[in-house]
Image: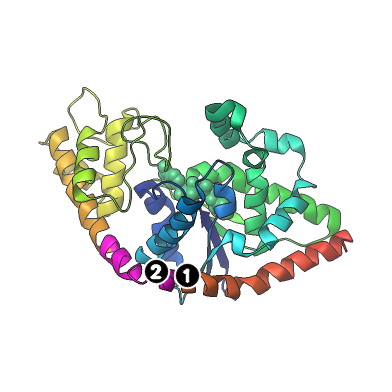
Amino acid sequence: MKERVFSGIQPTGNIHIGNYLAAVRRWVELQNEYENLFCIVDLHAITVPQDPSMLKAKIRETAGLLFAAGIDPEKSSVFVQSHLSAHAELAWILNCIIPLGWMQRMTQFKEKSAMQRRTVSTGLFDYPALMAADILLYQADLVPVGEDQRQHIELTRDAARRFNAIYGETFRIPEAVIPEVGARIMDLADPLKKMSKSGPGGAMAIGLLDTPEAVRSKIMKAQTDSLRDIRFDEGRPGIHNLLVIYELFTGMARTAIERHFSAKGYADLKRELAEIIIGNLSPLQSHYRELTSDPSYINHLLTEGAQRVRPLAERTLSLVKERMGLG
Ligand code: TYM
């Protein structure tokens, strides 16, 4: 039996190179080794206001980008969270066993709610319970994500252990798989903040569908520092971030990268990096255009994905209900 991989992505804003390097590209790499489930989490997206027609389009765009990046529908099930009501149902059940104090410790909620203040929804607070439901519903072994999701996966593990302790062995305890390099790609305008799909003013992310001109312009404007030498040094967040992106896209060793830039300046690094990113995104973008030329094709793949995973979700949900005496 192959171990099962589960991960999710929100269909909001523009999927960027941080999502790609820490998550999507790794999902592609893991495909042959594991059984794979990738979920487009539209129910998570509505924890903040969304324009309905835009959300519908973004769900298809996100799916198109996953397939264009190399997710193979033969090897992986890609599906939309709201197509399976079991996610919301299990989230409610988990709400009833997760102590409030655990939820109040979630740093992502604190950060996101601080930006919204009065309009913050109950759903945004409850976001981690729905995420736990996503993972536990499929009895996933491994959850490949970026660093920002670590705490949510810890909560998922705690929730599973608590449920198992109260009602008997029901859930498998999943493990986070977080890359050693590039688990947190930083924003180009403010390298002390993570790159984000829909960040506050000033945020600068490179979208997977960005034109070559947009990539060049964003990289050339990226914040650096007033030093000169090009070295991997975490104390210099701007340059460090650019070098990490360079490392991940080229696969070169750090020493080789530093040697390559030893007699060069920041402008050279930026010019080269921009072309490397453009060269990596270009095949993905043409594949995306092919895949989305027939809009019904993506819908078809998403329906098929949901059909494939439904029996797994239903099996867990009925076991949970039986254990709890529901119905
Ligand atoms: P989302 O949509 O914000 O991000 C998708 C994936 O990209 C990673 N990521 C980053 N990695 C490196 N640098 C960054 N700047 C960066 N920004 C985002 C995220 O860690 C993630 O792996 N809550 C999740 C979606 C989700 C999920 C799940 C994930 C819902 N249910 C169950 C795993 C398992 C989220 O909002 O990801």
Q: Which residues are magenta?
A: 284-298
- The kind of secondary structure element at disc 1 is helix
Res 295 label: 2
* Quadrant where the image shows the N terminus: bottom right
Q: Do labels 2 and 1 touch, CB within 8 Å?
A: yes
The quarter in which the C terminus is drawn is: bottom right
| Residue 134 visible | yes
Residue 54: give x, y in percent of width and height. 45, 51
> From this viewpoint, is residue 26 visible?
no
Residue displayed at 53% across by 75% down? 304
Q: Where on the picture, by quarter, is residue 185?
A: top left
**Label 1, on which residue?**
299
Q: Main secondary structure of the magenta part?
A: helix
**Whole-percent x, y for residue 262 in the image:** 14, 37
Residue 128 higher or lower than 90, as above or below? above
Q: Give the secondary structure at mark 2.
A: helix
Identify the residue at the far top of this view. Answer: 226
Say if 213 sits above or below 192 in the image.
below
**For residue 103, what is the image quadrant?**
top right
Measured as percent of width and height from the top left, residue 229 is found at 18, 30
Mark 2: C-beta under 8 Å from nearest atom of ligand 1 = no
Image x and y of residue 305, in percent: 54, 71
